[in-house]
Image (spheres, grey):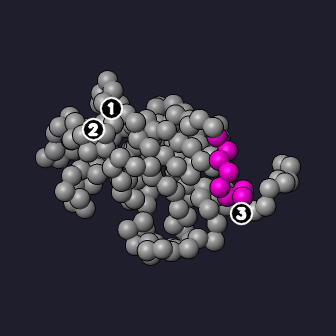
């Protein structure tokens, strides 16, 4: 890879993409942390904020889960970072989500826009920013919840579309 002519500080703020990519990902639904059902990342259990972009952080550096991160905590590197594999994961094809969702309860499948610093690999991406744009399916055990009702509530809370919903 060629050495950049930009100073390191400028490299951190210069976006690599002019237009966002589209990717698929899954979330579990958190019914306890907010007054509404919230999209929650499956690995570090990060709650995605409604109606705003989600930004990745390297949580491995803190050695804790997202909910334990310090306010104003500083990072030794930006995310995504290939050394730690930190960042927001998305896949190119919905079928590639199967392994991620096995054995999980209250899972929704959606499409996101991703941008900022983005690493592309064979089946997907690791990105700096993401924004959910559509819910396209659900799977897993929903216990006492009606997944269709929850998806409609997510649509209102997050301001996202509902696609043709399919249960996997």
Magenta residues? 10-17
- Say whether marks 2 and 3 touch (CB < 8 Å): no
The numbered mark at residue 161 is 1
Q: Residue at x 43, y 61 (%)?
A: 44
Q: In this orientation, does residue 97 appear?
A: no
Q: Residue at x 31, y 39 (%)?
A: 159
Residue at which label 2 appears: 155
**How busy is the neighbourhood of tag 2: few (under 14 within 10 Å), some, or many (20 plus)?**
some
Residue at which label 3 appears: 9
- Which is in the foreground here, disc 1 or disc 3? 3
For the residue pair 131 and 135, the one nearer the viewer reads as 131
Q: Position of residue 2 (x, y in %)?
A: 86, 49
Q: Residue at x 56, y 73 (%)?
A: 74
Q: In this orientation, does residue 70 appear?
A: yes
Residue furthest toward the left?
144
- Gap in angstroms between the C-alphas marked 2 and 3: 38 Å
The answer to if 166 sits in the magenta stretch is no
- Which is in the foreground here, disc 2 or disc 3? 3
Residue 82 appears in which quarter of the rendering?
bottom right
- Gap in angstroms between the C-alphas marked 2 and 1: 6 Å
Against 72, residue 116 (above or below) is: above
**Side of 7 where 57 appears, left or right:** left
Against 152, residue 46 (above or below) is: below
Residue 162 appears in which quarter of the rendering?
top left
Task: Give SS at disc 1.
Answer: strand
**How busy is the neighbourhood of tag 1: few (under 14 within 10 Å), some, or many (20 plus)?**
some
**How busy is the neighbourhood of tag 3: few (under 14 within 10 Å), some, or many (20 plus)?**
few
């Amino acid at each position: 890879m060629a050495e950049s002519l930009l100073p390191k500080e400028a490299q951190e703020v210069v976006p690599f993409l002019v237009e966002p990519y589209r990717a698929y990902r899954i979330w579990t639904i958190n019914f306890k942390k907010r007054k509404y059902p919230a999209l929650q990342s499956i690995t570090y259990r990060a709650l995605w904020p409604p109606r705003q972009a989600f930004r990745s952080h390297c949580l491995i550096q803190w050695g804790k889960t997202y909910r334990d991160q310090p306010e104003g905590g500083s990072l030794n590197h930006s995310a995504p970072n290939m050394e730690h594999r930190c960042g927001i994961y998305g896949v190119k094809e919905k079928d590639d989500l199967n392994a991620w969702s096995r054995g999980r309860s209250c899972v929704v499948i959606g499409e996101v826009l991703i941008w900022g610093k983005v690493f592309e690999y064979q089946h997907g991406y690791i990105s700096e920013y993401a924004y959910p744009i559509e819910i396209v399916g659900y799977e897993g055990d929903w216990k006492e919840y009606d997944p269709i009702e929850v998806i409609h509530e997510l649509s209102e809370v997050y301001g996202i579309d509902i696609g043709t919903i399919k249960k996997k």
